Image (cartoon, rainbow, N blue to C red):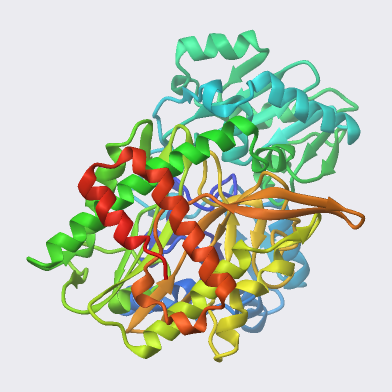
Amino acid sequence: AYIIPSNDPHQSEYVADYWNGREWISGFTGSAGTVVITQDHAGLWTDSRYFIQGEEELADSEMVLHRLTPDRSPLHIEWLKENLSENAVVGMDGQCCSVAMRNGLEKALGNRQLYLEDDLLELVWEDRPALPRAPIFEHDVKYAGQSRLQKLDAIREQMANKNATHHLIVALDDIAWTFNIRGRDVDCNPVAYAYALVEEKQATLFINTEKVPAELKQQLEADHIFIKNYSETKSTLHNLPKGSAILLSTSETSCDVMSAISPHCATINGQSIAMRLKAVKNPTEIAHIRGTMVKDGVALLKLYRWLEEEVQKRGVKETEVAEKLAGFRAEQPHYFGESFPAIVGWKGNGAIVHYHAEEATCATIEGDGILLLDSGGQYHDGTTDTTRTTVFGTPTPEQKRDYTMVLKGNIGLSMLQFPAGTRGNQMEILARQHLWQHGLNYGHGTGHGVGFFLNVHEGPQSLGPGATARAAESVELGMLTSNEPGFYKTDEYGIRIENLILTIEKEETDFGKFYGFETMTLFPIDTNLIQVDLLTMTERSWLNDYHSKVLDRLEPQLNEAEYAWLEEKCKAI
């Protein structure tokens, strides 16, 4: 058997085209999935977000869709155990297999041999895209709030606490944050392919040297950050002095890189220090996020006003909505690009959680129905991710009930006050409880961390069920997290309401510190879909207060007609 995952050598969720072999060989375009190929079977394992999409994209191929359970356990491994003989050999590209993944595979496969050497795709993928070559650029400290030296000092302090002489940083967003650099190597994620090695007095950035402009290289070297070629990562690790102790994350470090570390060096397995540091936004970042939410709210307002006018005259394709929204965002200061491809789902397409409209096959918005629009922008001063569900025409009682249950979940989480140290999987039930009372549910997590002009999905925190590593992380002061409960009725409609929420301090009592959330997203929630009598007075008050805040914050950026439109959308219920 040969396993083809969705990640790259840095365990990235979104990857450059060069590393997108799982999509190339299967035809499945979703962002998560694992392919397993044997002599007589080709299978794709993915989670419930992509079941409908997987069925459609694999329908005319030999590739078989395998559905993961809600806890997303690695069922492809169970399949291998059931279908391979005891002496079988399982292969995988060692560049894309993390040490933790290897350990799990070896334990599960028993006597079956695991072979982590060859990238077999290299032998058969004749028109494989080239590795990215776009130059990196500086992320100005006026946005970042901290210099790279301040960030390195914070990392070195924690290295000393762990008795580490070196810290290998693998995740691309951690590297971008640490050195205040950004890139264009991955669509929608402003990162560049690199490794970094931090020592007590210096640091090394391993990157294609052609991608580092001369002026930026001088600035980095002035801060004792030296540039080596990406290909020199392994030789540098192999030649570290005897007695070195390298802190690294086995869940991120590939077997290929790990194998290069000399046996006379100690390795310390631990979470990337930068991941937790960057998750807690500093005061400068928080101030910029508030401003970015205003810009993004204005872009969304322009989009929905345009759409409402257009559908009175003609049908509008889903793809046209996505293009128009990107154009409105591009009018805003400091815009860089989308934070992910916009999900524009009309009627049944909205029930496909990570749906992506294509020009030739997309739906046309016309008549009565529900539109789900999930989109976000990358700005030099922040990253956004917003979902709104909007009705055109008259909703059915069932649609209003389902929408109201989702809204109640969003509000319940927004209003939560919790003791410091509370984990994501302890609070996530608040977003689901009202749906559960009607025998309804949704198959995705309720929230993810969000970067600052970085990846729209960021660790360590997550609002999800179960005991996954991220869901078991505490939600700390200064973290920016999404709040996005939903409901999906196959072939009919999808509902999701998503705001970004910032963890803030609420009070300190004899029982310790208590935190809460500030809702950062600034755009109205469609009240035409609400069954008002299902809301409590407290929930109505929260919604009315939120709409007053939206109106107040966006007003200075609007002309008279835009303000009148927004005032109608923010009318108290």
In this rendering, the answer to whether 86 lies above or below 505 is below
Residue sitting nearer the eye, 183 or 412:
412
In this rendering, the answer to whether 6 lies above or below 254 is below
Q: Which quadrant of the figure contains the N terminus? A: bottom right
Q: How many marks?
A: 0
Q: Which quadrant of the figure contains the C terminus? A: bottom left
Image coordinates for residue 124, horizontal then vertical, percent: 39, 55
Residue sitting nearer the eye, 86 or 518:
518
Image coordinates for residue 402, horizontal then vertical, percent: 45, 83
In this rendering, the answer to whether 248 lies above or below 533 is above
At horizontal 71% and vertical 58% (from top left) the residue drawn is 102
Image coordinates for residue 373, horizontal then vertical, percent: 35, 63
At horizontal 32% and vertical 56% (from top left) the residue drawn is 567
At horizontal 66% and vertical 80% (from top left) the residue drawn is 85
Determine whether, in the image, residue 320 is placed left or right of residue 231.
Answer: left
Res. 227 visible in picture = yes
In this rendering, the answer to whether 304 lies above or below 287 is below
Residue sitting nearer the eye, 547 or 156:
547
Location of residue 170 by image quarter? top right
Res. 38 visible in picture = no
Determine whether, in the image, residue 254 is placed left or right of residue 451.
Answer: right
At horizontal 68% and vertical 45% (from top left) the residue drawn is 253
| Residue at the extreme left | 313
Determine whether, in the image, residue 486 is placed left or right of residue 468.
Answer: left
Image coordinates for residue 177, horizontal then vertical, percent: 60, 32
